[in-house]
Amino acid sequence: MAVRLEDRAVKLIGLGGIGTPVGQALAQFLSSRRLRAQLWLIDGDSYEERNRDRVLFQTPTNKAMERALEWSAACLGLPGVIPVPQYLTPRNAGRLIGERDIVFLCVDNHATRKAVSNRCARLRDVVLISGGNDGIEDGRAGTFGNVQIYIRQDGRSVTSPLTRFHPEIARPRDRRPDQQGCLALAASAPQLLFTNLAVAAAMLGAFYRWLCGDPSYEEVFLDIREARMQPVRRAALTGRA
């Protein structure tokens, strides 16, 4: 298990309702196993009072900085937790995501998902695990979520990029946080804490499966109200697409 993490950095993008429990579990796991893999926390946003229904925090400061201090202290300095108080954009993606990275993508917009998927598609070796869930809006109860796993090995896509089966990601109608004003950010749809936790657990499960060997599935759909979790297998990709 430790062999698969050698010379790799773990990059966590987004520290909201999904990213926070994912990051805490990763920090605890890496620390308990005495694995010295770096854990990068990437988020340009700050905590606000309206976030308390999904995330506990002490001060309304930058999310990456807040969690880096907390988890570094709790894990006695292991692993090396590196805060990056920036939003992920196409401009900085090349600097923040590199070869052999393990990327956990926990954002709430398709534009950022597309930017990260496109960056990973240019790398020879990378693991991307992306999770998200519905907001409580437009008649939706907010109980549905999904996780996608995109793996590149030796310049070949072992599983599908995030855009292949999801036109809403390939052609996003929303905007990245760095493109939005304060009012637009404040107007985001509320999410259900329990769905966030279910998606976080599914992402960590996919990571554990990868640690044990490449997963036999590349996407998971879940609905906590129906107690349903469905893995999806798709035809293996060929060539160097």
Image: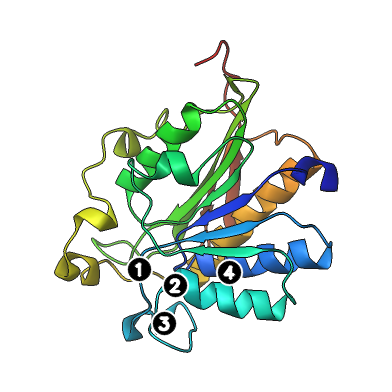
Residue at 43% x, 88% y: name it. 59
Residue at 59% x, 20% y: name it. 155
> Could you tell me which secondary element the residue under label 1 belongs to?
loop
Outermost residue toward the bottom? Answer: 58
Q: Are marks 2 and 1 in contact (CB under 8 Å)?
A: yes
Mark 1 or mark 4: which is in front? 1
Q: Position of residue 49 (x, y in %)?
A: 34, 86
> Going from the N terminus, do you reach mark 2 or mark 3 first?
3
> Could you tell me which secondary element the residue under label 3 belongs to?
helix
Colouring mode (rainbow / by chain / secondary structure / one colour):
rainbow
**Left or right: where does residue 92 sit relative to residue 183?**
right
> Going from the N terminus, do you reach mark 2 or mark 4 first?
4
Look at mark 1 in the image and give the residue it sits on: 45
> Could you tell me which secondary element the residue under label 4 belongs to?
helix
Look at mark 4 in the image and give the residue it sits on: 21
Q: Is residue 1 visible?
A: no
Numbered tag placed on residue 53 in the rendering:
3
Q: Are marks 1 and 3 in contact (CB under 8 Å)?
A: no
Label 2 – label 3 distance at C-alpha: 15 Å
Label 1 – label 4 distance at C-alpha: 17 Å
Residue at 56% x, 72% y: name it. 68
Q: Amino acid at mark 1?
A: Asp
- What is the crowding at mark 3: few (fewer than 14 residues within 10 Å), some, or many (at least 20)? few
Q: Position of residue 29 (x, y in %)?
A: 75, 64
Q: Are marks 4 and 3 in contact (CB under 8 Å)?
A: no
Numbered tag placed on residue 63 in the rendering:
2
Outermost residue toward the top? Answer: 239
Q: Are marks 1 and 4 in contact (CB under 8 Å)?
A: no
